[in-house]
Amino acid sequence: MTPLILKFFILATIPLLLTAKNGSKSQPSACFCKLQGEVDDCSCKVENLDSLNNKKIYPVLRSLLQRDYFRYFKVNLMKPCPFWSDDSRCALKDCHVQSCTEDQVPEGLKGKGKEINKYSEGAQKEEQNCDEERELGALDRTISAESMEAFKNWTQHDDKQETFCEIDDDNTPDCQYVDLLLNPERYTGYKGASPHRIWKSIYEENCFKPEGYVYGSKKPLAGLCLEQRAFYRLISGLHTSINLHLCNEYLFPAKNLLSAPEFRSNTEEFLKRFDPKATKGQGPQRLKNLYFTYLVELRALVKAAPYLEEEDFFTGNPEEDKDVKEGVKDFLEIIKSFPEHFDESKLFKGDPKVAEKLKTEFREHFRNVSRIMDCVGCDKCRLWGKLQVQGMGTALKILFSGDRIGLQSTVNAHHKQRFQLRRSEIVSLFNGFGRLSSSIHTIEKFRKLTS
């Protein structure tokens, strides 16, 4: 081979070698091909939301949600599925309430001759000594007597009003407080026909869809109006958020008899759910829909800021309540300073009768989605599904409440005769948005893991 021919051979081979070397990178990077530019049906850019969330909102909100007011959520996990026979309930091993033994409780939390205060500052650490002994799919409903006494006074802050979703009746005996910090959202092994049936029912029977649409097919938004597209993107964004948390907190079985199962990031599962080749090209759009859902709930929090700034965030602990109130105020100042909010006034415009009919359908479809959450077989998945759907429903309630809608509109303490938020709505609103915030933060993590 002459030197000239050898030179051309080398130049032609180098790109092929680089492609082979980096082939594993090209596929993962395709997951993020749409995560740039403007969010669909909005003017805000993805890059701006990444910066806002990851640098400012996520750290503050993550700390705020550790507080007692936001960590206890009252929920009924015993409601029967209203749509089909719930043959998958408690299918997971030991999906029942299991508390820690006394030996597993840190000494610093034990009172001499008094009720153990499991919810002091020491108990708010991310790692609980008893976590490894608790069954992975079980809910820990352990609540101290002191906390229960404080809960009795919270009901004075709960006022009923028309909502976009069904909210559990606090007075039913099956409604119990759950500590969200002891029951984090993660993958517990719940998979197969049961969860597939949940999402298929949501998309096929409750999302607006073009004629002839089949669940999982391409271009689900073709021919839909803005309101119908918004509904689909809200649901898709919620679905994406849940999937991201399952991928980020994925259950890996024990490697041997001496080791324990562990939760950690699963890049293979992430690619399975979001890579274009594995999702018929839909994965990147699913990720982008998350940003739409985030923008909608962000706007709701801004609109409700005057109302929330007047809340007491009552738990019975004056010092704790004061800290939470100041923390919420700081958080609201951050989000109010963001200039590119979702504009709800673009929805339900045009002919008043047509718009009202569409809004009614929108609300009824969403209420159905909230009812479907009672069909989820895994207790922990049901808990977080109900909480996040209720949080989204609360956001929608805020957006379409008050004397007017649009970027300059608010709801405040002076409107309390016409506008009220129950404590459970506030808790679900903040925690639901917290889940979306965590998801966007997780996207950056998977971007690095797959690059």
Image (spheres, grey):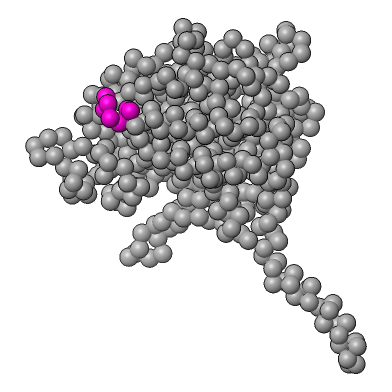
Quarter of the image for the N terminus: give it.
Answer: bottom right
Would you place residue 55 above or below residue 262 in this image?
above
Is residue 357 found inside the magenta-colored segment of the image? Answer: no
- The residue range painted magenta reads 316-322
Would residue 275 appear left or right of 172 to someone viewing this image?
right
Residue 345 found in image quarter: top right
Q: Nearer the viewer, residue 49 or 151?
A: 49
Residue 329 in view, yes or no: yes
Q: Residue at x 76, y 24 (%)?
A: 225
Quarter of the image for the C terminus: give it.
Answer: bottom right
- Mark count: 0
Position in image of residue 417 (x %, y %): 46, 7
Q: Residue at x 46, y 38 (%)?
A: 61
Please, what is the dominant secondary structure of the magenta stretch? helix
Q: Residue at x 63, y 16 (%)?
A: 405
Would you place residue 207 above or below residue 33 in this image?
above
Residue 80 in view, yes or no: no
Seen as rendered, the residue at the extreme left is 113
Would you place residue 293 above or below residue 92 in this image?
above
Position in image of residue 315 (x %, y %): 30, 25
Q: Nearer the viewer, residue 410 or 254?
A: 410
Would residue 388 appear left or right of 218 to someone viewing this image?
left
Position in image of residue 166 (x %, y %): 49, 20
Q: Residue at x 27, y 41 (%)?
A: 121
Would residue 400 appear left or right of 228 to someone viewing this image?
left
Position in image of residue 377 (x %, y %): 46, 36
